[in-house]
């Protein structure tokens, strides 16, 4: 398979930098770039301590992943460099992740990482290396529209990562390439096998890259110990139902872990009150949200304001909305929406932009559209 990297000049005289995580996706991107005839440089960022403290070999940029990325680069005959961005990653991603939990919000560190280390620092590094573009293994499609390049959902819905890239700016999108957006994952693995790449059957990482064994609470407690302080679980009227062992163990919409019996119907986490160290629980109906106010908006659309949908979780189905430039209003109530999550706005398959949910509007306080 050959890919047009849209370099704007003959590939023989061009240079492509590939972000190589050590996984199968970015390894196949490096192979496609090498096949184009351009000079290819693989770059791997060491983002955190990957030793015994992490204790896992399948996480992004762990020691094994750096070794795998280097092995693939040697197989392809391309240059490969590792850059230490651990301090930057700790300050811009891990600390923010812990801070959000301390505020009772639901963080999405993958978006923060793309906003900062990957699509700001790595992109600047690629420019310093004289690259014509930076190619990554993200499953999204880059399409040219009347106003320039656009982000569209991946052809494979099960692999689509457009939700995590809403904060990509127009300037960044001019320089980025996503060669895998039209491919299903099985085809990518088959390409890796055909090329005899050592990562062809390497499992995908399922957890947040810097969280050992999926235990995010342990990471948060280490950075923000106050999130592990016990407190009360109360109902919507403030009546004490029980005790909890730290807000870090709860997110809005969660049911497990409350351990409150004797109720007429199941209880869910409705909101967190970090200053009082309280978990507010209620029936599922209390989770219904009709709208959300956004902050940190990044807008890639032009004047689109109708026929819009939004996703408030990466795996959620897009919901029909109205949007006034600051607040989204759902045509039907949404459940489990939490401050700190991202709301990504689409027109059909195209990502128009999105922002961070600052506050939600309960269904009973907002009339239907």
Image (cartoon, rainbow, N blue to C red):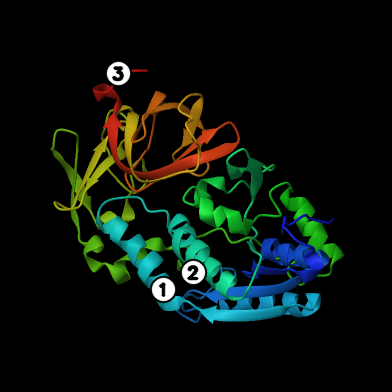
Read off the residue under disc 2: 121
Q: Is residue 226 left or right of residue 312?
A: left
Q: CA distance from mark 2 to mark 1?
A: 9 Å
The residue depicted at 81 percent of the width and 63 percent of the height is 36
x and y percentages locating residue 91 in the rendered image: 36, 71
Give the mark nearest the N terminus, 2 or 1. 1
Q: Position of residue 347 (x, y in %)?
A: 54, 32
Label 3 secondary element: loop
What's the residue at 76%, 80% (across, down)?
74
Tell me, for residue 367, which label it has, or none.
3
Q: Which residue is mark 1?
A: 88
Q: Is residue 265 visible?
A: yes
Residue 209 appears left or right of 28: left
Sequence-earlier tag: 2 or 3: 2
Closer to the eye: label 2 or 1: 2
Label 1 neighbourhood size at 10 Å, few (<14), some (14-19), many (20+)?
some
Q: Earlier in the sequence, mark 1 or mark 3?
A: 1
SS type, badge 2: helix
The answer, for residue 61, to whether it is visible in the render is no
Q: Quadrant of residue 116?
A: bottom left
Q: Quadrant of residue 8?
A: bottom right
Residue 254 against residue 24 in the figure, above or below? above
Q: Do callouts 2 and 1 mark residues in contact (Cβ within 8 Å)?
A: yes
Disc 1 to disc 3: CB gap under 8 Å: no
């Amino acid at each position: 398979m050959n890919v047009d990297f849209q370099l704007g000049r003959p590939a023989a005289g061009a240079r492509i930098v590939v972000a190589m995580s050590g996984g199968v996706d970015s390894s196949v991107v490096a192979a496609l770039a090498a096949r184009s005839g351009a000079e290819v440089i693989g770059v791997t960022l060491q983002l955190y301590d990957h030793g015994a403290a992490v204790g896992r070999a399948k996480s992004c940029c762990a020691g094994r992943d750096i070794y795998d990325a280097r092995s693939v680069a040697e197989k392809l005959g391309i240059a490969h460099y590792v850059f230490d961005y651990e301090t930057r990653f700790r300050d811009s991603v891990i600390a923010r992740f812990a801070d959000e939990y301390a505020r009772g919000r639901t963080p999405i560190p993958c978006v923060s990482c793309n906003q900062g280390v990957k699509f700001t620092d790595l992109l600047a590094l690629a420019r310093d290396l004289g690259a014509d573009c930076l190619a990554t293994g993200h499953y999204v499609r880059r399409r040219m529209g009347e106003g320039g390049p656009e982000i569209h959902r991946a052809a494979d819905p099960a692999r689509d990562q457009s939700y995590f890239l809403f904060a990509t700016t127009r300037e960044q999108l001019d320089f980025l390439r996503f060669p895998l957006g039209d491919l299903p994952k099985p085809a990518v693995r088959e390409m890796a096998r055909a090329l005899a790449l050592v990562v062809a059957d390497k499992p995908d990482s399922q957890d947040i890259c810097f969280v050992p064994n999926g235990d995010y609470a342990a990471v948060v407690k280490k950075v923000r110990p106050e999130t592990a302080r016990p407190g009360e679980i109360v109902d919507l009227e403030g009546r004490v139902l029980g005790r909890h062992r730290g807000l870090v163990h709860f997110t809005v919409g969660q049911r497990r872990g409350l351990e409150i019996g004797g109720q007429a119907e199941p209880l869910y986490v409705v909101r967190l009150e970090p200053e009082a160290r309280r978990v507010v629980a209620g029936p599922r109906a209390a989770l219904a949200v009709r709208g959300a106010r956004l902050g940190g908006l990044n807008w890639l659309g032009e004047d689109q304001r109708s026929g819009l949908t939004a996703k408030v979780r990466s795996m959620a189905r897009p919901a029909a909305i109205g949007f006034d430039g600051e607040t989204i209003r759902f045509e039907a109530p949404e459940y489990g929406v939490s401050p700190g999550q991202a709301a990504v706005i689409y027109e059909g398959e195209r990502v128009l932009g999105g922002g961070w949910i600052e506050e939600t509007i309960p269904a009973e306080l907002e009339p239907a559209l």
